[in-house]
Each structure stands twice: as C-alpha cells, then as structure tokens.
Image (tube, coloured by chain):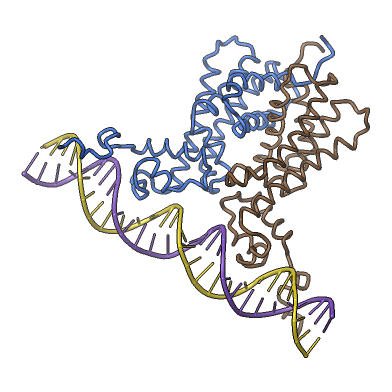
Chain colours: A blue, B brown, C purple, D yellow
Amino acid sequence: MAQNTAIKANETSRSAVGRDGVLDIAARLFREQGYGSVSLRKIAEAAGIKAGSIYYHFGSKDEIVAAVLDAGIRVVHASMRDAITDLRADTDGETVLRAAIRAHLRALLDVSDYTSANVRIFGQVPQSVRDANLPTRRAYEAEWDSLLSQLKKDGTLKQDVDIRRLRLMLIGTLNATLDWFDPDRGSADALSRTYADVFLNGILQRQDT
Amino acid sequence: MAQNTAIKANETSRSAVGRDGVLDIAARLFREQGYGSVSLRKIAEAAGIKAGSIYYHFGSKDEIVAAVLDAGIRVVHASMRDAITDLRADTDGETVLRAAIRAHLRALLDVSDYTSANVRIFGQVPQSVRDANLPTRRAYEAEWDSLLSQLKKDGTLKQDVDIRRLRLMLIGTLNATLDWFDPDRGSADALSRTYADVFLNGILQRQDT
DNA sequence: ACGCCTAACTAACGCCTGTTAGGTTAACAA
DNA sequence: TTGTTAACCTAACAGGCGTTAGTTAGGCGT
C-alpha cells in the first residue's frame, strides 16, 4: 500500500537542486532563449521548484544572471590559460596561438553553457550587470594581450599588428561562431584549425610557391 | 505675446511622424537597447505619439521588428553590391574583396540604424520573426558566396577554402565589430583595411622577405 | 524529544506589457 | 458647408513580470 503513494519519486530523495542546480539551469535557458525571454518562473519550472523559492538562493534576477556571466568568463579563461600553460617552454609561437584559439572555441561550443550564455546574453542584460562583469572580462582580455604581445616580441607575429585590435578581432570572430555553429557539419576542433589557418596565413593564393 | 505661447512648434505643422518615422525610431531604439527592453510605449514616446496609435501603422510589435530586420539586410546588401558593381570589370580580385568588406562595415557602423539593429537583435526576436527574415538574409549570403566563388575560380583565393565557412567567418567577424567599435579610436574605413589585411595575408611574420 | 536549519511552498503586491475598441482632430475635396 | 479620410488619442483589458512575506516540511545535533 505504501508503494503507489510515492509521487514524484524520480528525484534524489528530496530533489535538492540547490543553488548550483538553479544556476546550471539558468545558464542553459539563457543560452537557449536569451535574457529577456527567460523569466524566474521559467527557471523555477525547469528546476522543478516554484518561482518564489529561487529567492532562497539568490537576492534578485540580476544576481543570477551576474553569476552566470562571471562563471562564463572564468571557465573560458581557465580553459585558455591551461591550454597554453601545459605546453613545453620551447613550443613555437604559432603552436601556442593555435592552442589558445582551440581552447577558447572548445569552451564556447563544446564545454560550457556558462560561456556560451555569456556571449549570447551579455548585450541584453542591464548596464549594471554588464559593469559588474567587466573586471572578470578584463582579466581574460589581459591574458590574451599578454600572449599576443609575447608573440609579437619574439617575432612570430608581424611587427605592425595592433595588439588590442587583433585581440578584439580574434575573440569577436570566435564568439560569432555561436550564431551558426552546427556540430553535425564539423567539430569545434576542426573549425578552430580553419580559423587558425586563416588568421595566421590569410586566404590569398601566394605567388611564391 | 505670441512668442512664448509657441509650444512644440518644432515639428512640421502636424508632427506626422508617419509609418516611416516610427520605423526609424524603432530601429534606433532597438540598436541602442536591444529587443526586449524596447516596448511599444517607449517607441511611441520617442516618436511623440501614444502607444495605441502605433497600431494605425502596424498590426503588431512583431510586424515592426520584422520590418526593421528586413530593411537592415536590404541596406547592407545594396551597399555591398553597389560597391563591387561600381568597379571596372578588370579590377583585380583582392581589390574587389576589399571593397566588399569596406561596404559591409560602412553600412554597419556608419550608415544605418537598420543594419546595426538587425545584427544586434536578430538573436533576441521570436523564432517566427527570424524565419520571416531568412529569405532576405539568404539573398545577401548568396551574393557573398557568388563573389567568393568567383575569386576562388580566378585564382585569387587559395583552392582549399570552404566558401560557406569563409563567408560565415567573414560576416561574423565584421558583425562582431558592433560590440566594441568606437569611432573615436579610428574610422570604419581604417578598420576595414585592417580586417582585409589580416584576412588576405594573415598575421604571421613571413620568412621570405 | 527538542529546537534549529535548510529548502522549499503559497499567495499576493504593484507594475509593465502587447493589444483592442471606439472616439477625436485637422486637412482637404466637392 | 458638408463629407471623407488619415492620423492620432483615450481608456481599458488580460496576462506576465520581479519580488515579498509568511508558512511548512524534512533532517541533524544535542
């Protein structure tokens, strides 16, 4: 008799999505539907709880989206830094740059709802939330500038490149992938190779072969 | 005495923003604030009319945003096509590609609220509105594919480039500029030159000089 | 057994949204 | 002078929003 009285028994004892669970779901929904279309009630429903309950974990919707944005940058930053740190000290500049590009694209397309959510909704959130995310962003940008500066100094890159512009162009290009990438048409890794080829050598047929 | 009783005399007799005026203002607001943050009441206020009055010109908010999206593509398409059509028939491939890049970037950054609004809000509007915009989009994409295919055939481009991928990468890169471009740091034309340099020749320092 | 803590629930608040129906005004034509 | 029409206004609708206050239920330490 106790058997069929079990209602909603699919969750682990006491569901317990918790703060992290809510955040995971929010990141996924933000990535899929954008900022404006995702209400607290939608997040709550996807998490299996009621809208008001979210306020046990977060103080406001802004706090949720701010947490998602920050995590997004931290994930891709860690991914990119690890990728270039793991290389041997004598690795040539071109290989290092290729590794950084691949790491960024992987984090964006394969790994993290947080990173893709960040790229997708950053332009849609209130100014105050954007501002709060800026320090984390600047740290990641500084990592890229540091890498590119080193590659310029050691002669890997042309001497007339503008570091800031190149970084904006690179990250902008990689992030734009999110609008059209389809894993059925090719992996993120293969795509990152194409990107690197174009950026490093250009698309012009050369006479000198 | 008639002097200071003139209230709101700046508009032509009976204001008459009209359908086109409303559309212009909607495009500007969408570009500045995104789709979700711009309500019909905001558009109406900026146009100097009341929210309900918008329904004299448009059947729904979707109809407004759809009109903005379509105009955005048509403007940049016309700009790009004109730029490459104006060139003499014997112009070399590299120059043609540079002209196309410059035209796209100009439409996006200098000319049109419609084009920049399109790029900014396309990912935020309802699916049905996106779908309605697709044919116009496809036509512009076909123009680029046609140009790139020709450049590949005549030997300007490397023979191993994937046209579709290259087009997605190119347009994605140019559009991403919208997120960070600051006219005080350099003109759109100067930027388009940098873009073309990178895409055509790459950023790697070459041995063969 | 008691009380505390965590994680949820219910119900409502004021506000803003897109949208509709019906009324008003000014310019122009006959 | 009257009729017509384009362009707007007013007032309200239902529904969704973020947010708040107060309540409830289960698990753990003492």
User: Is B183 or B107 nearer to us in this picture?
Assistant: B107
Coordinates of residue A19 in the picture (x, y in percent) = 36, 38
Q: Is residue B68 left or right of residue B127?
A: right
Residue at point 64% right, 18% down?
Answer: A193
Q: Is residue B189 left or right of residue D15?
A: right
Residue at point 76% right, 70% down?
Answer: B10
Residue at point 55% right, 29% down?
Answer: A108
Residue at point 69% right, 51% down?
Answer: B67
Instruction: Residue B79: name its quadrant.
Output: top right
Q: Is residue B72 left or right of residue D17?
A: right
Instruction: Residue B100: name its quadrant.
Output: top right
Coordinates of residue A133 in the picture (x, y in percent) = 52, 40
Coordinates of residue A9 in the picture (x, y in percent) = 26, 35
Relative vertical location of residue A100 with respect to residue B29 in this rendering, above or below: above
Coordinates of residue A207 in the picture (x, y in percent) = 84, 13
User: Is A203 or C3 nearer to us in this picture?
Assistant: A203
Relative vertical location of residue B75 with respect to residue B95 in this rendering, above or below: below
Q: Quadrant of the N terminus of chain B?
A: bottom right
Q: Quadrant of the C terminus of chain B?
A: top right
- State how many labels appear: 0
